[in-house]
């Protein structure tokens, strides 16, 4: 069934990743009428497959990406304050050893080869210290503590490490629940009047005078839309959208670089992360994850084939195991892996020579040959809000009445409490809902912040929350996810709205899927 066109919207956005949802929120809050179409679930692609750091990108300093690093560093604390439930500060321990080597083709390594050939590719300690000095001071840090030096023979961070590592540097960055960040942006966009369409694929779009004519397909059928501007925020599909949906000739495109992660049972007992450097010049993080696990990544490989096919290959798993085993006293093997995930970086195709060297900065390209088209290439989770602001600067000439920028430090849903207030909020929730365990209360606050109370409602006992699907996931929470957070399938719930997939058995996930299917058919 084809639904007829309704009146034109100001902005039609293709893609419900962090960039599409960030632009939707910002634009809707400035008074534009916005519609966003995501072909699957929100954050189903790159935006749920990141390392989940709000970071400046220490290693991008070696590529002289100063603009990106400065913007991202400055942004860390702005974001932390706006979403203290889903993001928090983290300390990173960077063990130092003389064997560490540079990647050969960074501008820094080329300079050192020229002026200090005797280093023979080594990454000297003074250079790391210099990088960390810049990192501490480029971003107007107020909340996050600065770098310190660690004696690994004394510090708890040295305990799980090979004794050859005797000292380290410890610096700050932040964690973020990437897929929840996307959903909260979509919800806030909707609260400002945007229409968010999930499971809705843009199959074609063409210009006719001052308007875009867009066709989408969803389980509800085919629908025609009219829009004054079109934003292509399709991430790894940005080039596919330009070529096959909009049919525009363009030299611009995306370079697809796959990054995979492995998750193991918890490998060490403290709450700090490791930043490991390899002999090949690459780096790898080992991060405490979901309380009982360790997240390790990432790889960096050119990806050929559809973006949706990205998987962590056995070779990548072996590479990551070998990488961290260089550092840890107990080697990590494939048997330790409990989960893997893989995503594709949609880097702007700038003709860089290696996957690791392609720019991580974003590029916004405006095509005003008729109704405007804004293509979004690249970007980081960390800079999504700034990218959205920059996108609206590009679109401002089309919308003279556009409001001012507004999103800095404005809380996302559930984030209206102090950045260091999680413990107090958790204790208060436990006091009011005494049946919650520490883990359960902590999980709810980390997911929903001040809205955890709305999820729990009037419940006085655990039984009041309805069916328990396992690992503290109840029917009340599921109802919230299905009615307020666009969740349609068990996968949306256990791998994106939460990471309960790590704790639920296959049978429990199947039971959840069956329940959700039944609920959905009842809602029809
Ligand atoms: C391994 C890895 C680690 C990373 N780590 C970090 C990190 O720690 N910190 C950080 O700041 N950044 C990190 N990044 C970068 C960050 O994840 C990405 O830059 C960001 O998620 C890109 O978001 P996006 O919205 O552009 O793309 P996506 O999240 O991929 O969203 C694009 C969406 O468009 C949809 N779509 C495509 N075609 C259509 C169509 N025709 N109709 C409707 N919808 C469509 C897709 O389904 C998809 O959901 C990492 C990236 C990778 C791969």
Image (tube, rainbow, N blue to C red):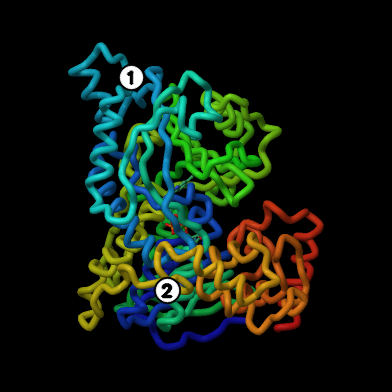
**Image quarter (top left, top right, bottom left or bottom right) of the C terminus:** bottom right
Checking the image for residue 151, the label placed there is: none
In this rendering, is residue 21 above or below 174? below
Q: Residue at x 45, y 60 (%)?
A: 234
Q: Is residue 201 visible?
A: no
**Disc ID at residue 416:** 2
Q: Is residue 61 left or right of residue 255?
A: left
Q: Secondary structure at mark 2?
A: loop
On screen, residue 114 above or below 223: above
Residue 321 visible in the current orientation: yes
Q: Residues within 10 Å of mark 2 (few under 14, many from 20)?
A: some
Query: Where residue 344 appears, x then y in whole percent?
Result: 49, 47
Asked which quadrant contains residue 329, the reply is top right
**Pointer 1 residue:** 122
Query: Which of the two discs, 2 and 1, sits closer to the camera?
Result: 2
Question: Residue 512 occupies which quadrant of the picture?
Answer: bottom right
Quadrant in the rendering for residue 409: bottom left
């Amino acid at each position: 069934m084809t639904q007829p066109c309704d009146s034109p919207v100001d902005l039609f956005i293709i893609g419900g990743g962090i960039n599409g949802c960030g632009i939707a929120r910002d634009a809707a809050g400035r008074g534009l009428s916005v519609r966003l179409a995501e072909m699957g679930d929100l954050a189903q692609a790159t935006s749920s497959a990141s390392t989940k750091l709000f970071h400046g990108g220490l290693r991008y300093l070696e590529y002289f990406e100063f603009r990106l690093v400065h913007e991202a560093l400055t942004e860390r604390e702005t974001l932390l304050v706006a979403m203290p439930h889903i993001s928090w500060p983290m300390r990173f321990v960077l063990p130092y050893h003389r064997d560490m080597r540079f990647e050969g083709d960074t501008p820094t390594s080329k300079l050192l080869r020229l002026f200090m050939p005797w280093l023979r590719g080594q990454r000297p300690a003074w250079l790391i210290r210099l990088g960390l000095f810049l990192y501490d001071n480029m971003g107007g840090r107020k909340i996050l503590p600065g770098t310190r030096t660690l004696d690994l023979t004394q510090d708890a961070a040295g305990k799980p490490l090979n004794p050859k590592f005797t000292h380290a540097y410890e610096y700050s960055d932040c964690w973020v629940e990437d897929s929840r960040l996307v959903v909260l942006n979509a919800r806030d966009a909707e609260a400002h009047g945007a229409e968010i369409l999930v499971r809705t694929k843009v199959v074609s779009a063409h210009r006719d005078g001052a308007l875009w004519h867009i066709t989408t397909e969803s389980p509800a059928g085919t629908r025609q839309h009219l829009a004054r501007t079109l934003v292509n925020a399709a991430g790894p599909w940005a080039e596919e959208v330009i070529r096959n949906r909009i049919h525009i000739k363009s030299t611009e495109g995306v370079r697809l670089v796959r990054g995979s992660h492995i998750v193991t049972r918890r490998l060490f007992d403290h709450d700090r992360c490791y930043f490991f450097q390899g002999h090949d010049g690459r780096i790898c993080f080992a991060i405490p994850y979901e309380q009982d696990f360790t997240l390790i990544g990432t790889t960096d490989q050119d990806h050929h084939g559809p973006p949706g096919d990205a998987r962590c290959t056995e070779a990548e798993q072996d590479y990551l195991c070998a990488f961290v085993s260089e550092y840890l006293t107990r080697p990590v093997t494939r048997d330790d892996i409990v989960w893997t995930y893989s995503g594709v970086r949609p880097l702007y195709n700038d003709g860089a020579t290696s996957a690791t060297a392609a720019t991580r900065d974003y590029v916004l390209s405006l095509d005003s040959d008729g109704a405007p088209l804004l293509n979004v290439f690249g970007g980081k989770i960390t800079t999504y809000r700034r990218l959205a602001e920059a996108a609206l600067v590009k679109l401002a000439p089309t919308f003279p009445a556009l409001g001012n920028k507004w999103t800095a430090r404005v809380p996302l849903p559930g984030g209206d409490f102090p950045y260091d207030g999680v413990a107090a909020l958790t204790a208060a929730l436990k006091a009011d809902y005494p049946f919650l365990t520490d883990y359960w209360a902590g999980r709810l606050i980390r997911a929903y912040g001040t809205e955890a109370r709305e999820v729990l409602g009037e419940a006085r006992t655990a039984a009041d929350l309805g069916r328990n699907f396992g690992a503290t996931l109840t029917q009340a929470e599921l109802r919230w996810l299905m009615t307020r957070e666009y969740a349609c399938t068990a996968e949306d719930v256990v791998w994106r709205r939460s990471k309960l997939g790590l704790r639920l058995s296959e049978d429990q996930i199947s039971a959840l899927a069956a329940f959700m299917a039944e609920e959905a058919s009842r809602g029809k």
